[in-house]
Image (cartoon, grey):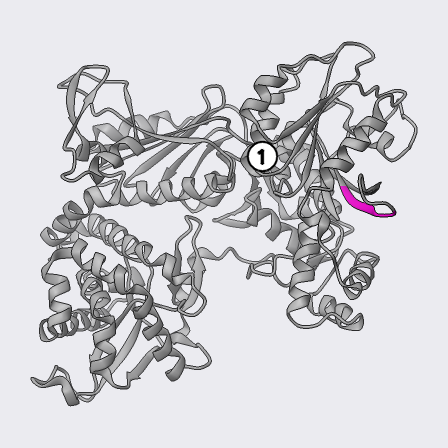
Amino acid sequence: MAKLMVVGEANTGKTSLLRHLHNEPFNPNEETTHGIEIRPLDLSHPSEADVTMHLNTWDLGGQGIYHATHQFFLTNQSLFLLAWNARSGFEQCRLYYWLDTIQANAPDSPILIVATHIDERDANIPLHDLRRKYPQILALHGEINNVDGAGIETLRQAIAAAAAQLVNMGESWPSAWYQAADAIRTRTEQYMTPQQMWEAMNAHGVFGEAQLQLAQRLHDLGELLFYQDDDELDDIVVLKPQQVTSYISKVLESEEVIAGRGILTRAHMEELWHNLDPTLRDGLLRLMEKFDISYRILDDYDKSLIVERLPFNPTDYEASWDAMPDMDGCREIRIKYKLNTVPAGIPTWFIARSHRFTTHNHWRYGVLFADVPEAPVHLGLVQADTHENHVQITVRGPHPHNFFALLQDGMEMTLRRFPGLNIERVIPCSGHGDGICDFEFPLETLLRATSRTPPVQEIQCPSAFEQVSVFGLLFDVHWRSQQHEVISRLDAIQDGQETFWAELRDLQALVQREFLRHFRQAQRHLDSHCPNVFVIRPLGSSSWHRNMAGQKMALQLYCQAPGAWHPTLDGGRYEITAPVAWLQVVAPYIGHLVSVLKYAAPLVAPVLGMASSEYAERVKNDVKLMEELVKKLPDIQAAVMHGVEAGMEQALQAEGAMLRAVRQLLDQQDPYQQWGGLRKVLTPEGHYLWLCEYHHEAYQPERSR
């Protein structure tokens, strides 16, 4: 069993093509497909007698408004039929756009190009050039007559030959799987709970791990929608995926939403989805938010912004943006992403993902963000150009490092949704004297220059033939080129004068987030994934003994909210058995942890909204104890003495053993994994954080009321 995806512009005859494949007559009054229609198609195996192949055909509506929703279903190991209208020509049918879209989303999937309406004009495309650029193209079928179906048998054979080569097509299912799948797909209700699905599988002999595997196969084939690894969506199984797209289409096509510049009210949603159970309504709204089709407005959760219905024309953002350079000490950071195509969903998915920075200045191809929307210190402008095929991020403000890093990470996460997208990251030239230079340096070239031994310090600008500092170009854009300057600046303002609190908060968040980023890969391993920011405290004493061999110690977990690291509010404190031996394992990591942790104390109380300085003093005392601990253990002291980066290199070498040692300690002391109430969160920018309940709420949209 496999997926046959039929894509192309509107009015290319995709639905008529599928009717002929199903041996159905041509319908001259065929209505335009809205959303997606899924139907089964059986074909004889091309080389194995008496073997029938089962495909699910996906007829994707060609109107532009649906393209972003289609991205969810354009998956690898599918077979694509790309239809174009011969009477319109391949340029007007945007053949290159669709090939780029398939390549970006499903780079390993084969493609058959099909010309329709050849009764009016011959099919003529530069097939040789296309196949050189898109090697997954199998063939061009240019003799399909939409009216009488001439040429359809040749196409049917080509589909069968291509489908037989798909990995999923050769997969053999146990008979119990088929019976359980039939029982699930023939249910008449719109949705079911996971427990009901497991019970249905139990009734047909599918148990344990096989249940999860079968559920994933059915999801991949489009038989149902079940996001079992998503905390927000794992409580519902949608049984009719095509209905999901039709209901979302009602929102996208709503005149009220269009007239309201993309605003969907709860009252209007209930009107559009009046025949849906409230639980399913809530599930669909969460699904739209998961895929960044919409987001709930922060100051009114009874309203959602439908990003694909944003206006094409920019809002009046220029006055705020142009006023930023007049501020004292304003700086600007830029990066440009040059793409082979700008897929549907860019930048609208990014706009939705980063909605907590909204200034309500957003349009189809751009957005103006603020680090603190109520009282902006920094502004970020993101613009996409679909003609030049690029996206640019520009951040302005007195100390833009942290806000730029957040927006950059959010854009990188958005781009990762398109595994076959060609991306070139470029950095604008810093200029020469008072002159402005329009040359752009490839980021990859600059990074190669810094990796040389010794690093290349300057590079020639081909436009002005003058030397430019490599590290100057990378500063603010690449962490390694700026971390020493950021650390030095933090040291300079560590006294925490109130006038520097905003900058201190931003730099703290940047340093702490980059610290965690280095260890994210090891954290992904199942046997070691756990909270990894903590302090070590002496038990029964307010200070360390001169001889630590017999001293008892405890580990205190910290919330990892960037810019607001603090001890867990309730619990998360564990006695360390054999502390000296344990410290020897984790020493390199602790060395670097201390170098970052020392910047946590000054703003803890203000960030948590505490009137008293008691909590901040507790953090300061923790930092003091950790610094004293470092001095007492030579292995740890060596990591710190060699500086932040040297400490990190040693930590990276030991990270596997270190994380396992931490996880083993936590499992022994806390087998139910309460971990002081810390909860794992994947932020919109792709950072895994362990957060207390207070900070966790900032990343969780309220459920529908």
Q: Quadrant of the C terminus?
A: bottom right
Q: Is residue 627 visible?
A: no
* Residue drawn at the location 19% of the way across and 73% of the way down: 622
User: Residue 208 location in percent, x, y?
Assistant: 66, 72
Majority secondary structure in the magenta region: strand
Depth check: give the residue in front, 322 or 599.
Answer: 599
Does 628 sit left or right of 114 as displayed? Answer: left
Depth check: give the residue in front, 451 or 228.
Answer: 451
User: Residue 404 location in percent, x, y?
Assistant: 31, 40
Residue beneath disc 1: 308
Q: Secondary structure at mark 1?
A: helix
On screen, residue 340 above or below 284: above
Q: Which residues are magenta?
A: 50-56
Does 75 sit left or right of 465 as displayed? Answer: right
Does 11 sit left or right of 685 as displayed? Answer: right
The image quadrant that residue 515 belongs to is bottom left
Depth check: give the residue in front, 261 or 68.
Answer: 68
User: Residue 105 location in percent, x, y?
Assistant: 56, 38
- For disc 1, the neighbor class at 10 Å (few under 14, some 14 to 19, many from 20) is many
| Residue 395 among those drawn in magenta | no
